Image (tube, rainbow, N blue to C red):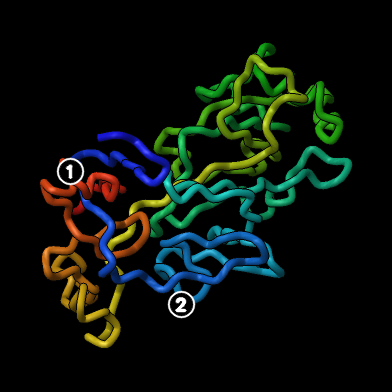
Amino acid sequence: MEATPTNLVLFLLPSILFISRSPHVTPATPCPPCGNTTVPFPLSTTPTCGDPAYKIRCTTNTLVFDTLNNSYPIESINPKSQRLVIRPAPLVPNTCITTDKIHQGIQLNNTLPFNITSSNTIVYLNCTQALLLSPLNCSSSSLCHTYINATASASVCNNGLLCCTFRTGGSSNSYQIRVRDVGCSAYSSFVNLNPDLPVNRWPQPGLEIQWLLPRETVCASPQDCDSATSACGLDPSSGSGIKRCFCINDLVWDPIDGVCTKKATSHDLNGSGRNRITVAADIV
C-alpha cells in the first residue's frame, strides 16, 4: 500500500485492526479551542465535551492540568501519542525550594487515566542525606551538578546542598514527583533529555504525562447517541450501571478521534479504496 500524506497508520499493540474512515461517524462532542490551542479528544474542558474522565481546564486562554492538590500549565499536547507536557513549579525566589513544596510536589490522582511517562529526567535539589540510601544518582558526577552550575535561577542550590538525578518510569513515580522535608525540597524535569548536551541546549523544563485510550462515550439515554452509528447500552465491565454509546452496524470504535468508523474491506485494502486506510487501532 503506497503511503500518502492522508494515509496515516497507527499501530497500537497488542492487536491490530484496520479500519477506514466512513462518512457515517459518531464523533464525541469536540471541545472548543482554549485561546489558540486545540483541545483534542478525549481531553475535556467542560462536562459536555470530550470525555469528562479526561478533565483539564481552560483558564484565561491557557490549558491547565489539575493534580490532587495543585495545578500546572499545559505546555504541549500530542493526541497521536496520547501525551501532554506540563510546566513544573519554579523555585521560590532566592531559595532552593519549589513553589509546590507546600503540596508535596506533583501528585496525580491514580484513579484517573493519566500517569507520568518514562521520558522525564528529574533533577532533585536541596536533598537530605537520607537520599544517599536511595537508588537515585546523588554522586559528585550526577547531572544535577551540571544543571546547578549552568542555571542562574538554581545557583542558590550550589551551597554544599545534596542533589540527585533519576529517570522516571518506576512504579514509585508513575503518579508522583515528591518534594518534602525528609527528601528533596526542589526539583526540575526535562523531557527526552540528552545528557551529553550542554545545559543551554536542554529543552525547557517540562514533565510528560500520558493518558489511556478512552472507552466509548458515556450516555444516559438513546438520545445521547447517534442512532445511525451507535446505541446506548449497559457497559458490562463497569459494574456500576454505566451506559455507553456502543457502535452498531459493523462499525468499530476509534479511540484516537472518538468516532465509530467502518471496518476496512478487502476492496479498501487492495482496490481503489486503498487511500482510505487511515488508522490501525486495538479495540478492546
Residue at (69, 27) in percent of width and height: 202
Question: Where is residue 284 drawn, in percent x and y?
Answer: 19, 53
Residue at (53, 52) in percent of width and height: 107
Q: Mark 1 falls on what kind of element?
A: helix
Read off the residue under disc 1: 269
Q: Does residue 139 lie above or below 173 as drawn? A: above
Query: Quick one: 169 or 132, which is closer to the camera?
Result: 169
Question: Where is residue 160 drawn, in percent x and y?
Answer: 80, 22
Side of 278 relative to 16 (left or right): right
Query: Quick one: 178 or 86, which is closer to the camera?
Result: 86
Task: Give the amino acid type for the residue marked by disc 1 in the picture.
Answer: Leu
Query: Are the two marked residues, 1 and 2, in contact with CB atoms closer than 8 angstroms?
Result: no
Which is more foreground, mark 1 or mark 2?
1
Q: Between disc 1 and disc 2, whose residue precedes?
A: 2
Instruction: Residue 148: name its quadrant.
Output: top right
Query: Quick one: 159 or 41, which is closer to the camera?
Result: 41
Examine the rendering and report whether any part of residue 202 can be seen. Answer: yes
Question: Where is residue 173 drawn, in percent x and y?
Answer: 47, 39
Task: Give the amino acid type for the residue marked by disc 2 in the picture.
Answer: Pro
Side of 225 relative to 98 (left or right): left
Q: Residue furthest top?
A: 141
Examine the rendering and report whether any part of residue 187 can be seen. Answer: no
Q: Mark 2 falls on what kind of element?
A: loop
Query: Quick one: 157 or 205, which is closer to the camera?
Result: 205
Q: Does residue 78 lie above or below 32 as drawn? A: above
Read off the residue under disc 2: 47
